[in-house]
Amino acid sequence: MGRPRKNTGRNPKDELRYRTNRQIRVPQVRLVGDNLENPGVYPTQEAMKMADELELDLVEISPKADPPVCRIIDYQKFLYQQKKKQKEQKQKAVQVSVKEVRFGPNTDEHDYNFKLKHAEKFLNDGDKVKAFVFFKGRSILFKEKGEILLLRLAQDLEELGKVEQLPKLEGKRMTMFLSPKKKK
């Protein structure tokens, strides 16, 4: 059992992502940034002295470049901005949820219209719809009825969504997926 780690308030994953100051062990680096009079290629020691004079950190931004690209910035502020950017990108990512609509093989007209309205609402909200017919007991004999019902649903929702997967029998369920059409 090793010695307990000292909590420095830093995430060890962040430490591995960017090398800073003394961790940079290449002979020369390319300096870029707003706070430099003349960006260019400098010996690493000179770049570290420049960072010390400005009381900032030398951070390796692009280690794969030749020579590696570094910036003189406040490292903690830089990490904060990176996390903020990632959070914004995550919020912009579209979350698509799947809503289910369940039918029986002998669903009557009123129930069908009721569930059709729900499916329309789901597609208008931008959700995918998983429509399925559940066969109980001997009702599996009416699998043609179930397929006709799902194809009718797809036809009724033609303007709002497109069929992603045609009706497919899996055990006692016949399933069909619909996804919303892109709005123009």
Image (cartoon, rainbow, N blue to C red):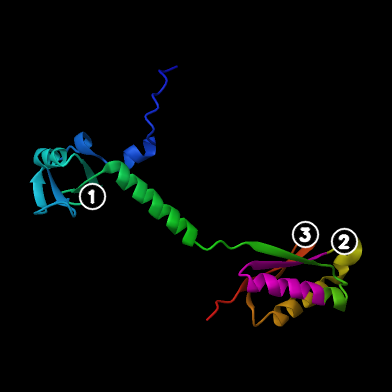
Among numbered discs 3 and 2, the one appearing first in the sequence: 2
Q: Nearest the camera: 47 or 158?
A: 47
First to last magenta residue range: 113-134
Q: Nearest the camera: 96 or 75?
A: 75
Which residue is labeled 3 in the image? Answer: 171
Among numbered discs 1 and 2, the one appearing first in the sequence: 1
Q: Secondary structure at mark 3?
A: loop
Q: Secondary structure at mark 2?
A: loop
Q: Is residue 80 magenta?
A: no
Q: Nearer the viewer, mark 3 or mark 2?
A: 2
In contact (CB < 8 Å): disc 3 and disc 2 = no
Q: Residues within 10 Å of mark 3 (few under 14, many from 20)?
A: few
Q: Nearest the camera: 148 or 183?
A: 183
Q: Amino acid at mark 2?
A: Lys
Q: Nearer the viewer, mark 1 or mark 3?
A: 1
Q: Position of residue 89 (x, y in %)?
A: 43, 58
In contact (CB < 8 Å): disc 1 and disc 3 = no
Q: Residues within 10 Å of mark 1 (few under 14, many from 20)?
A: few
Q: Is residue 116 magenta?
A: yes
Q: Residues within 10 Å of mark 2 (few under 14, many from 20)?
A: few
Quadrant of the rendered image containing residue 21:
top left
Label placed on residue 64: 1
Tell which residue pokes out farthest to the front in this image: 54
Quadrant of the rendered image containing residue 120:
bottom right
Q: Position of residue 88 (x, y in %)?
A: 43, 57
Vertical order, 156 against 41 (above or below): below
Which residue is labeled 2 in the image? Answer: 136
